[in-house]
Amino acid sequence: MWLIVYIDPGTGSYVLQVVAAGVLGAMFALKMFWHRIAGFFRRDRPSKPDVEQGGKSSD
Amino acid sequence: MESRHPASFRDPAGFIFRRDGKLYRQVNRAYEPHYRHLQESGLLDLLVERGLLVPAPEVEVAPHEERDALAVLEPRPLAWITYPYEWPIGALKQAALATLEVQRLALEHGMVLKDASAFNVQFEGVRPILIDSLSFERYSEGRPWIAYGQFCRHFLAPLALSRYRGGGARELLRAHLDGIPLDLVCRLLPRRSWLSLSLLLHLHLHARMIRRAARGGEAKGGGRGGVTLQQQLGLVDNLTSWVRRLPIRYQQTHWSEYYETSTYEEESLAQKERIVGDYLAQAGGQKAVDLGANTGRFSRLAAARGLSVLACDNDDGVIEELFRKSDGRSLLSLVIDLVNPPAAGGWAHQERSSFSDRARGDVVLALALIHHLAIGNNVPLVEIARFMGRLAPALIIEFVPKSDPQVQRLLAARQDIFVDYHEDGFAEAFSSVFEVQRREPVGEMGRTLYLMTRRAAG
């Protein structure tokens, strides 16, 4: 059991993150690409801010 | 009169110290390149301007440890220090979103958030704010987000549990100060949580990978493959959209209708509000602790009078709703069970302080509460007085007599062993700690409102 403590618990997180970020990074690139296309056709509309600011949830 | 903060020992970048009642943060030389980049990239100003980071200007004050010192900062003081295991889930969600937004902005400025601990977020009313200005380091191309695992344990795990399993996640956070271990959270989540791509990646596969690495199997698996900036932004974007879509559910309990169904008629409530308002004016001060806040009617009254209010109740439902309905910086709602309030914990019992060490105000409100403690939980009146006396020098308390229907309901299920529970017994018990300043009957049920002040010690 004690062997476990000598292995950096970050190792598993690190490996997983490389995989997850690969998948999600590709999806993010697609999303950004889509936004750009959509934006091209709706250029005159002001874009919404991306993240809600502090405060309350809208749920 | 100087001491280093007992929770501030992990980070070589600097630490918090207290001198003459003021809190300062020392920045160490080791942190200089990161600190300069934080300032020069404009990230520091942006985060402060957007209310995501506590302003902490440099001050001309002698450092606590001269040898390593680069600068001394004086963070804007916060009314209250609260912990994730006291927050309603709605607040944990907001804290998670703030943390992710800080990480996103940091990435855009060539930095990363190196510490994603939920304890680094505090609340000013309903607004989450990061308190550690030394949590940033310069981004180096290809390096994964060092705080990713921590973010998953501190935020994603309890939020996912609350999504699928309702309450209880809060208690796990209390036990696991560095966030809920991922293998534990995965055993508790239902199978259908695998259907969410975010939870599949960030919790289930993440937990498996940690286990596998611990066995020594695939520790080398990912090799030294890196994570590009675009991929990091994708990771943050995915976490953000999962958290943002998370519905905050809470059970409507009988407490949420308390004031609609309880013994108080509208007229008596107006009278009670007027008296409490008068007492608050007389008590003065800036900070109020409302124990048994319920729907927050009187917390809001205190907040409207300019007080910074900590509204506490043991009912998830009412606190969740109070958080959702509040805005601004003056009212913070917490789930606190007064017969088991959060204890001190962490390294040497000093890293996290107890609820009663943090919930110190100028006045305590304890309305329609005493019978729950004295009769519902058998706490002697004199002990209740002592506990409240620790929190503030003034007390606004309502005595609810045995004849009250609410007390009768409590007594229906238990033997009446409470011979001293009457107004004279109450006044006598409380006189050991407090001095009565005002006393007024309220409503038709024989209830009484008191304003008391703490006797000088000795």
Image (cartoon, rainbow, N blue to C red):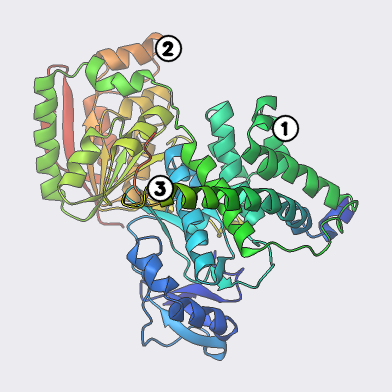
Q: Of B131 and B444, which appears nearest the observer?
A: B131
Residue sitting at the far top: B412
Residue sitting at the far front: A41
**Label 2: chain?**
B
In this picture, residue B57 sits left or right of residue B107: left
What is the C-alpha distance between the residues marked 3 and 1?
47 Å
Which numbered marker is on residue A41?
3
In this picture, residue B217 sits left or right of residue B269: right
| Residue located at (45% from left, 81% from top) | B40
In this picture, residue B17 sits left or right of residue B286: right
- In which quadrant is the C terminus of chain B drawn? bottom left
**Mark 1 highlights which residue?**
B187
What is the C-alpha distance between the residues marked 2 and 3?
74 Å
Mark 3 or 1: the one toward you: 3
Q: Amino acid at mark 1?
A: Arg
Q: Of B394 and A49, which appears nearest the observer?
A: A49
Residue B172 vertical position relative to residue A50 in the rendered view, above or below: above
Q: Are marks 1 and 2 in contact (CB under 8 Å)?
A: no
Position in image of residue B388 (x %, y %): 33, 44
Position in image of residue B60 (x %, y %): 36, 88
Q: Amino acid at mark 3?
A: Phe
Residue B407 seen by the camera: yes
Residue B231 vertical position relative to residue B45 in the rendered view, above or below: above
Residue B111 vertical position relative to residue B305 in the rendered view, above or below: below
Position in image of residue B385 (x %, y %): 32, 40
Which numbered marker is on residue B415?
2
The residue carrying pointer 2 sits among few (fewer than 14), some (14 to 19) or many (20 or more) residues within 10 Å by Cα, namely few
Mark 1 or 2: the one toward you: 1
Q: Amino acid at mark 2?
A: Gln
- In which quadrant is the N terminus of chain B drawn? bottom left
What is the C-alpha distance between the residues marked 1 and 2?
42 Å
